[in-house]
Amino acid sequence: ELKVEQNPLFLSMQEGKNYTIYCNYSTTSDRLYWYRQDPGKSLESLFVLLSNGAVKQEGRLMASLDTKARLSTLHITAAVHDLSATYFCAVDMKTSYDKVIFGPGTSLSVIP
Amino acid sequence: DAGVIQSPRHEVTEMGQEVTLRCKPISGHNSLFWYRQTMMRGLELLIYFNNNVPIDDSGMPEDRFSAKMPNASFSTLKIQPSEPRDSAVYFCASRRSVGGELFFGEGSRLTVL
């Protein structure tokens, strides 16, 4: 069964600092997604990664996918308070048509 | 596009009552997912449909839960009878095809007293 893990689960960082969130998964997949959730809100799509080596960037966030290592990273550059939210990775199970499993989420707090 | 529409947004009910949550996916999307979110268990996939057909319901917690998708523009998730441990936010999401991103509704917050 597919397991999706994220590290760390909680992250408190100062504004202006850089950090990386890691997403590991246990089965073959070449499709991975990153989402953002603000408290009490729905999930918002950030990145869609559809192949090994895929890299996407939007503002201070950059996501990458290494399918051989079954690893995705979400890198935060020069964090600002507005990035405070919970970030989820989600994996499309290649062996199970259309099934998308979410990681536990990383709660990010950016402190001024 | 109007986005994924869920109703009700909030529901408070008493244990033993039937609860029906509704979802209208984005037009043209052929996959629909139901997730449940709690602090303890995170985002759990309950069931998903492709072209209105249930593909995998292994995430449905017990027989009290059922889901239907009678047509491409409507799905329901029913809990009968409801229990306090069913209290959670239930999200519906849809996508156009495999390999595409999921678009989420605003969620239905269920409280069972």
Image: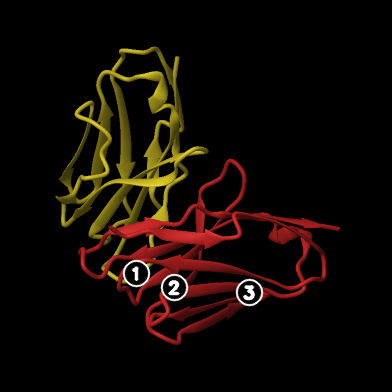
Q: Amino acid at mark 2?
A: Val
Q: Residue at x 37, y 45 (%)?
A: B44
Q: Amino acid at mark 3?
A: His
Please give the chain letter of the residue carrying mark 3: A
Q: Are marks 1 and 2 in contact (CB under 8 Å)?
A: yes
Display colour for chain B: yellow
Give the x, y percent position of residue A105: 53, 54
Q: Which mark is residue A90?
A: none
**Which residue, given by chain and number where applicable, does mark 1 sit on?**
B100
For the residues marked 1 and 2, what is the alpha-carbon distance in whole angstroms? 8 Å
In the picture shown, does residue A1 fall above or below B86?
Answer: below
**Which residue, given by chain and number where applicable, does mark 2 sit on?**
A48
Q: Quadrant of the C terminus of chain A?
A: bottom right
For the residues marked 3 and 1, what is the alpha-carbon distance in whole angstroms? 22 Å
Please give the chain letter of the residue carrying mark 2: A
Mark 2 surroundings: few (<14), some (14-19) or many (≥20) residues within 10 A: many
Give the x, y percent position of residue A47: 49, 71
Give the x, y percent position of residue B110: 43, 27
In the picture shown, does residue A36 fall above or below B99?
Answer: above
Query: In this rendering, does residue A38 appear at all?
Result: yes
Q: Secondary structure at mark 3?
A: strand
Q: Residue at x 45, y 14 (%)?
A: B113
